[in-house]
Amino acid sequence: MSVRGVFVAFEGVDASGKSTQARRVAARHDALFTFEPGDSVLGVELRRWLLDAAIPMDPETEALLMLSDRSHHARRVIAPALAQGRSVVTDRYYPSSLAYQGYGRGVDLARLRAATELAIDGCLPDLVVLLDVSLEVANERRARDHEDRFESADLAFHERVRAGYLELAAHDVVPWVVVDANLEQTDLDARVDDALAALPWTA
């Protein structure tokens, strides 16, 4: 009987450094690195529509497309790897929809949670790492020449997303750790590694 791999999700507002940390942690622990939206053949097409700021889209439509990508991702990428004993580190998972489409866009949270449960089919992370960065720092880091649907949203939207993340971290059923992502890279790496040290990595 194989042992389930460790499953860690990195979350945060755009330009929080989560993608860098997720890739670094996955490499350090010989884990599968994956991301949302778009890390599958189907996901590539969904990502193209989701991130194109030129295509008008209702919040509910946006949420359902995100959940379509997540359902495929959880069932075809994450769950099979975990079942084979491989650890998985993902750049975004279900908290992103709750933060962005729920708190940010105003989609009903109860309905969004119910749809999320259907999408992920019990595939929950062992830990969610929230890289919490001030919006001022995130704004300085963000590249302005290729902003997507979410990066181009106004400041009030990003404030709601950040507040939503902190609310989720305090009350979610899955364990979270909040890391100050305003730190310099070396210090941030050390904080993240400390937060993950207790997990039963296989490598």
Image: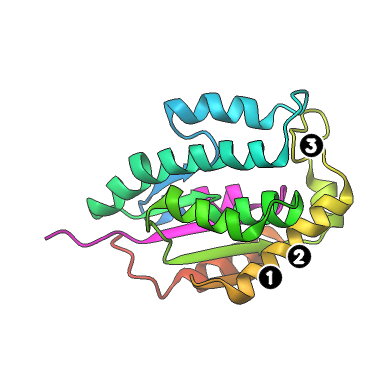
Decide which of 154, 67 is in the foreground and name it. 67
Q: Is residue 20 magenta?
A: yes
* C-alpha distance separating marks 1 and 3: 27 Å
Q: Is residue 2 magenta?
A: yes
Left or right, 54 with respect to 190, comes to: right
Percent coordinates x, y for residue 123 in the rendering: 38, 56
Query: What amino acid type is highlighted by mark number 3?
Result: Ala
Query: Which residue is found at the position 46% from the left and 56% from the top?
Result: 117
Left or right, 120 with respect to 17, comes to: left
Percent coordinates x, y for residue 108 in the rendering: 67, 55
Kindly check if marks 1 and 3 are in contact, taking CB atoms under 8 A apart as contact: no
Eyeballing the image, is 60 above or below 176?
above
Q: Single out the mark in the foreground, 1 or 3.
A: 1
Q: Which secondary structure, mark 2?
A: helix
Query: What amino acid type is highlighted by mark number 1?
Result: Glu
Query: Which residue is found at the position 30% from the left and 47% from the top?
Result: 81
Query: What amino acid type is highlighted by mark number 2?
Result: Ala
* C-alpha distance separating marks 1 and 2: 6 Å
Q: Which residues are magenta?
A: 1-23
Residue 143's disc is 3
Q: Single out the mark in the foreground, 2 or 3.
A: 2
| Residue 24 appears in the picture as rendered | no
Residue 167's disc is 1
Pointer 2 or 3: first along the chain:
3
* C-alpha distance separating marks 2 and 3: 23 Å
How packed mark 2 is, by other alpha carbons closer than 10 Å (few <14, some 14-19, many 20 or more), is: some
Percent coordinates x, y for residue 68 in the rendering: 50, 38
Residue 191's disc is none
